[in-house]
Image (cartoon, grey):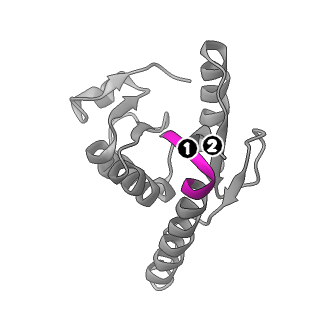
Amino acid sequence: MEKKPVTLIIYGSGGHKEQMKRLLALMKTHAEFDFVSISDTKDNFNSLQHFECNEPRDKFSKWKAPFQLLKNAFTTSKQCIQITRKYKVAGLVSTGPGMVILPALIFKLLGKKVIFLESWSRFYSRSLTGKVMYRIADTFFVQNEDLLALYPKAIYSGRL
């Protein structure tokens, strides 16, 4: 049986989710595609399959952070294995947050395209995830023109 081609989308709650909602709407106006998703929220985008994963760091407790990071690494690694067994992943698209880093590395090593959009809430500083994803992503978009000074190889996309 041939694997179904999909795009993997990874997003977080709040603004990351709203950005992904808008991005998916734009992408669907240009082409039909199927996708699977990983998020720290319930699936609201009717993906073929949805995986839930906690944020990899605890922003409020330095004591919980290492354990949460290990748990996240195990969970996302397992999810990536499940996804590659069932689907033919064409590439990965993410609006953040940090949970994208390990899957992006995995799929980049598998030769897949990685696209990242830095948060629209960033104007004058880079996010921690953005700093890492700038080095991993094949295509890196910023939504605020001022960020081009911090990410010289980025592409200004305008706001979603």
Can you tell which of label 2 and label 1 is closer to the viewer?
2
Q: Is residue 90 left or right of residue 30?
A: left
Q: Residue at x 47, y 79 (%)?
A: 70
Q: Residue at x 31, y 31 (%)?
A: 147
Q: Nearer the viewer, residue 81 or 66?
A: 81
**Decide: marks 2, 1 in contact (CB < 8 A)?**
yes
Q: Nearer the viewer, residue 134 or 136?
A: 136
Q: From the viewer's perspective, is residue 115 above or below residue 83?
A: above
The amino acid type, in three-letter code, at marker 1 is Lys
For marks 2 and 1 on the same chain, the one whose residue lies earlier in the sequence: 2
Residue 71 can be seen in this image: yes
Residue 81 magenta: no
Cα distance in 3D space between marks 2 and 1: 9 Å
Quarter of the figure with the C terminus: top right
Task: Give x and y (percent) for residue 1.
Answer: 67, 47
The amino acid type, in three-letter code, at marker 2 is Glu
Dot 2 crowding, Cα within 10 Å, few <14, some 14–19, many 20+? few
The residue pinned by badge 2 equals: 2
Q: Residue at x 25, y 34 (%)?
A: 151
Q: Tell me the SS state at disc 1.
A: strand
Query: What segment is highlighted magenta in the picture?
Result: 84-90
Task: Give x and y (percent) for residue 131.
Answer: 30, 49
Name of the residue lying farthest toward the top: 30
The residue pinned by badge 1 equals: 88
Q: Is residue 49 left or right of residue 83?
A: right
Dot 1 crowding, Cα within 10 Å, few <14, some 14–19, many 20+? some
Q: Residue at x 33, y 53 (%)?
A: 109
Q: Is residue 55 left or right of residue 107?
A: right
Task: Give x and y (percent) for residue 101.
Answer: 41, 56
Residue 85 magenta: yes
